[in-house]
Image: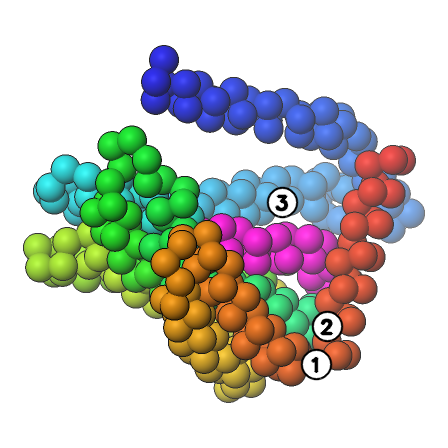
Amino acid sequence: MGVRSAAVGVVVGGFLMVAVQLPSLWRQLRSPGPVPDTTAGPAGPAGSAGPAAGERPMRLALIAAVLLFALCRQSQVLVERFLASSLPAGAISHLNYAQKVAQIPMTLSLMVCTVTFPVVARALADGDTRRARARVERDLVLASCVVLAGMCAVLACAPQMIGLLFQRGAFTAADTAATADVMRVYALGLLGQTLVGALVRCYFSAGRPSWYPLAVMAAGIATTSLIGAATVSRWGVAGIAAANAAGITVTAVLLLTGLRGTGRGNPTGITLGLRTVLAELGRPVLASVLAVAAGTFAAGRLASPVAALAAGCTAVAAVFVPLALSVLGARRSASALRSLRTVTRRLTHGRNR
C-alpha cells in the first residue's frame, strides 16, 4: 500500500480517539441538568424558564467562538501550503517534516496547560480571579521553559535529528540539510505557539464568548500571508517558516496585551502585568541563547550523528536546566508539581465515580 498505509493509520487512529471519548461524552449529555430553585419565585414574565432560555444562545456563541478560533488557526497550514506550491519539488515535504519534528516540544509544553485548565476554570467559576491569575502566570513561565528547552535542542541538533529520523531511501543528505535549515527557522516561533495555547484558555474558560482571540488570530494569519508572500520568492521555504514564526508571535503578543485590563475583549476578569510577564519570560529566553551556543558547539565536535545528538542535548540540558530552575525557583516548581498531582487525582476520581 505504500504511503496509503500511513494515511489508513491516521484515519483508524482518529476514529479510535473519538471512540475512546464517546462514552464519557454520552454520559455527560445524558446526565440531568441542575435542578432549578423553585423557592426563589419566578425570574420574570416567563417564570423560571428565563435564565435557561438565555443560557442556550450564550453556549452556542461560546462554542462558535472556540471553533472559529481553531479553524482560523488551522488555516495557517493552508496559507503555508499555498505559498509553497510554487516552489520546486520537495519544498513542501521539507516544511512538513520540519514542522512535525519541531512541534514536539510545543506539544509537551501545552500538556502542562491542558492538565491545569480545570484549575483556572474552577477559580473563575468561584470568582477568584487572583488565584486564576497566579495559576496562569505560573503556567506561562513553566510552559515557556519546557518549550524553550526543546527549542534549544532543535536549534543545536537539527541536522542530527533529521538525519537519524529520515535520511534513508529517497531522502538524501541534501534533503536533510534543507529540512534542518527550515526546522531551525520554524523553531523560532515555538515560544509564540506555546503562549497562544496557554493564553487563549483565559478567554474561553470563563463560560462567556469572546471574539477577541479570533480577531488577533486573523491578524496573525494576515501577518503570515504578507511576510510569506514577500519572502517566498527569495528565501523559499525558509521564508515561509519565518512568516509562520512572525505571525504566531504577533498573535501571542496581542493575546497577552488583551489581558492587561478588563474590557469587551477580556470577559474573564483576569489581568496580567505585561511587564512582569515579559520580565519572567526574558530570563529563560536569555538562558536558551546560552544553551543553544553550548549545544551547537558540543554537537559540532563529533562526526557520529548519534553521538553528536547525545552530546548536544546533554550540553543544552546542562546549561538550560539550572538556569530555568533558578527562574522558576524552588517554591514555584513545587507549586507546579502539586497542581499537576492535584488535577490528576481529581480527574481520576471523576472517572471512577
Residue 116 located within the stretch drawn in magenta: yes
Mark 2 vs mark 3, CA separation in Å: 42 Å
Residue under the point 70% across and 81% down: 329
Q: Are marks 2 and 1 in contact (CB under 8 Å)?
A: yes
Label drawn at residue 333? 2
Asked if residue 75 is positioned above or below residue 319 in the image, the reply reads above
Three-letter code for the amino acid on which mark 2 is drawn: Ser
Residue under the point 8% across and 59% down: 234
Residue under the point 80% across and 64% down: 338
Three-letter code for the amino acid on which mark 1 is drawn: Gly
Instruction: Point out residue 204 in the picture as x, y percentages from the top left corner.
Output: 57, 55
Label drawn at residue 329? 1
Q: Are marks 2 and 3 in contact (CB under 8 Å)?
A: no
Q: Which quadrant, please, contains the N terminus?
A: top left
Left or right: 262 with respect to 339? left
Q: Main secondary structure of the magenta part?
A: helix
Magenta-highlighted residues: 103-124
Asked if residue 290 is positioned above or below residue 154 in the image, the reply reads below
Q: Quadrant of residue 93?
A: top left
Instruction: Point out residue 334 in the picture as x, y percentages from the top left corner.
Output: 78, 71
Q: Nearer the viewer, residue 53 or 350?
A: 350
Residue at which label 3 appears:
54
Q: How many marks?
A: 3
Mark 1 vs mark 3, CA separation in Å: 46 Å
Instruction: Point out residue 77 in the picture as x, y percentages from the top left corner.
Output: 31, 44
